[in-house]
Every structure is written in structure tokens, then in C-alpha cells.
Amino acid sequence: MKIHYKNIHKRTWEIMFFPSKCWNKVRNEHTDPKKVTYEYFIPVIAICSILFFLINLLNNNLSQSLGLAIINLVSSLAGAWLAHLLIREYLCCKLNCPQVSAFNLTLYSATVFLLLHSLGIAFGNWFIGQLLTFCSFIFIRTLYLGINTLLHIPANQKTNILIIASLAIICFPIITTKLLMIIFRISAINV
């Protein structure tokens, strides 16, 4: 398994700034979900956690920064997995969509959210942190355009899946982060 960092950068750039073009490419690709997870999603989240660690070194000591970075990594992966389970349950069981559709919607939308949200949280209450956290909601546009590529779903169900998927992608990583911070007795509120 070889990771192509240029492809990771290109795909991330496209999914953030040109999502309709990227969704057309994703729809036409026939890739293995495990391959995409290990060669795209996990490296992006790992890079986010490394940047999270380095940025946290500005405000915290080494051990707390390392703990926060590990919590960010685990909660991002676990939150995206839980969001995928919920979205897959809704799309595949209720709407009879292929599982790869639920996987792609979750993975690429969560990548956009987790990338910007992790960096925003790392910067904390600085202006750049607040700006990145606010910009993390651009993933809703990515998700919306991805849902619109699912042609066999009725319009009212597209609205429902947008709401369910958005809330799952936002809430599961954040709840997991807060739970891990409480378990490991790290301050969950940064003032």
C-alpha cells in the first residue's frame, strides 16, 4: 500500500473548492472503500493531528499537546466511523442505495469538516481558529452536492439525508472528543 501525497492534496483541494467536479470523478471511480480509507482518509486525519499537535505546542506543554493530538486523531476516526454507520443505515436500509454511496458521502464530507475543524480547534480562541471553525461548515455544501449525485433518491429524502448526515458528521467527532477529554481528565473547555 503506497500513499500518493500529491493525489491526497489534489483530491482534498478539489473536494473543498470544486466539489461538483470532484463528486463526478468519485461517482465514476470504482474504488475499494478500504483502499480509500487507508490511502486517503487516514493520512489526511493523521496530518491534521500532527498539525494539531504542533499548533497546541504554542499554548500547552508537550504532554498535554500530545494528549490532545491523540484525542483529536481517535475522535476524528471514531466520529467519522459512527457517522458512516448512521448514514449507511439510513441510505442502505431505508432508501436502498449502494453502500459505497454512504461511504463516499461520509468520507469526503467528513474530511472537509474534520480538516478545518481540527485546525480551528487547535488555534483556539484566536481569530484564525474561529475563522477555520466557521469555515468547517463548508462541508455541508460538499455533502449537498454529493447527495445530488444520487439520482434515484426523491427530493424530500435528499433533504432528510442532508440533515441527518450533517448532524452526524458534526456531532459524533465532537461528542467523542469531549468524552475522551473527560475520561483522560484534560480540560474540556478552553477559555
Image (cartoon, grey):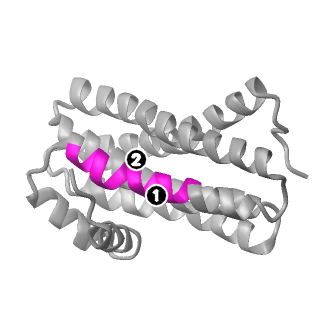
Crowding at label 1, few (<14), some or many (≥20) Cα neighbours within 10 Å?
many
From this viewpoint, which residue is outermost toward the right? 191
Residue 162 versus residue 181 in the image, above or below: below
Q: In the drawing, does residue 186 fall left or right of residue 164?
A: right
Relative to the observer, which residue lies in front, 20 or 129?
Answer: 129
Q: Does the segment drawn in magenta span residue 40?
A: yes
Element type at mark 1: helix
From this viewpoint, which residue is outermost toward the front? 62
Which region shows up in magenta?
A: 35-49
Residue linked to disc 2:
162
Which percent across, then down, holds residue 116? Answer: 56, 63
What amino acid is at disc 2? Leu
User: Residue at 39% of width from left, 40% of height from top?
Assistant: 160
Relative to the observer, which residue lies in front, 60 or 129?
Answer: 60
Say if residue 147 shows up in the picture: yes
Give whichever of discs 2 and 1 has the lower sequence position. 1
User: Residue at 13% of width from left, 45% of height from top?
Assistant: 152
Q: CA distance from mark 2 to mark 1?
A: 8 Å
Dividing the picture into quarters, in which one does residue 85 lie?
Answer: top left
What amino acid is at disc 1? Ile
Residue 34 versus residue 131 in the image, above or below: above
Relative to the observer, which residue lies in front, 140 or 15?
Answer: 15
Q: In the drawing, does residue 128 fall left or right of residue 104?
A: right
Element type at mark 2: helix
User: Residue at 9% of width from left, 60% of height from top?
Assistant: 28
The dot on residue 140 is 1
Q: In the drawing, does residue 8 fall left or right of residue 151?
A: right
Which percent across, then down, holds residue 103? Answer: 27, 41
Which percent across, then down, holds residue 7? Answer: 26, 69
Q: Does the segment drawn in magenta span residue 157?
A: no
User: Magenta stretch: dominant SS?
Assistant: helix
